[in-house]
Every structure is written in structure tokens, then in C-alpha cells.
Amino acid sequence: MVVLPSRIPEDQAALEWHIEASEQERSGDPALMLAKATVVLFWPAFMLFGLVAAQLQE
């Protein structure tokens, strides 16, 4: 039986961070949910503002 060496510590840390982040996402971290909601709600407003500003400059 061949035993492979354990993963590089940096890879392991990155993997653990990714798992932790996805667990937070599933559990509904309030700050993360707020950030997503802010982006979703305000993105159309920024786009619309950009269009209006472009129309006014013409």
C-alpha cells in the first residue's frame, strides 16, 4: 500500500477556508446576506442612474 504525503499546508488552509466560507453561506451569515442583498437591490439603480446621466449629457 502506497501512502501519499499529506497535502501542502497552504492548500489545506485554502481548502478549509473555502469549506468554512461555504458553510457560513449555507447557514446564512447575516453580513454576507446583507452584502448580497445590497448588491442585488442597488445594482439596477446604479445602472439606471448611469443611463439617465448619459441621456442628460447628450
Image (cartoon, grey):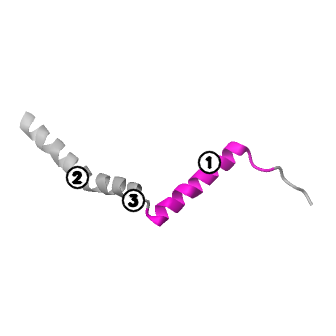
Kindly check if marks 2 and 3 are in contact, taking CB atoms under 8 A apart as contact. Answer: no
* Label annotation for residue 44: 2
* Label annotation for residue 30: 3
| Residue numbers of the magenta segment | 6-28
C-alpha separation, residue under disc 2 versus residue under disc 3: 22 Å
Tell which of 51 and 9 is nearer to you: 9
The local secondary structure at tag 2 comes to helix
Quarter of the picture holding the N terminus: bottom right
Tell which of 49 and 38 is nearer to you: 38
Residue at point 25%, 56% (across, down):
41
Q: Residues within 10 Å of mark 1 (few under 14, many from 20)?
A: few
Point out residue 54 in the picture as x, y percentages from the top left corner: 13, 38
* Label annotation for residue 14: 1
C-alpha separation, residue under disc 2 versus residue under disc 1: 34 Å
Q: Residues within 10 Å of mark 3 (few under 14, many from 20)?
A: few
**Marked residue nearer the N-terminal end (3 or 1):** 1
Quarter of the picture holding the C terminus: top left
Q: Nearer the viewer, mark 2 or mark 3?
A: 3
Q: Is residue 13 visible?
A: yes
Residue at point 79%, 50% (across, down):
6
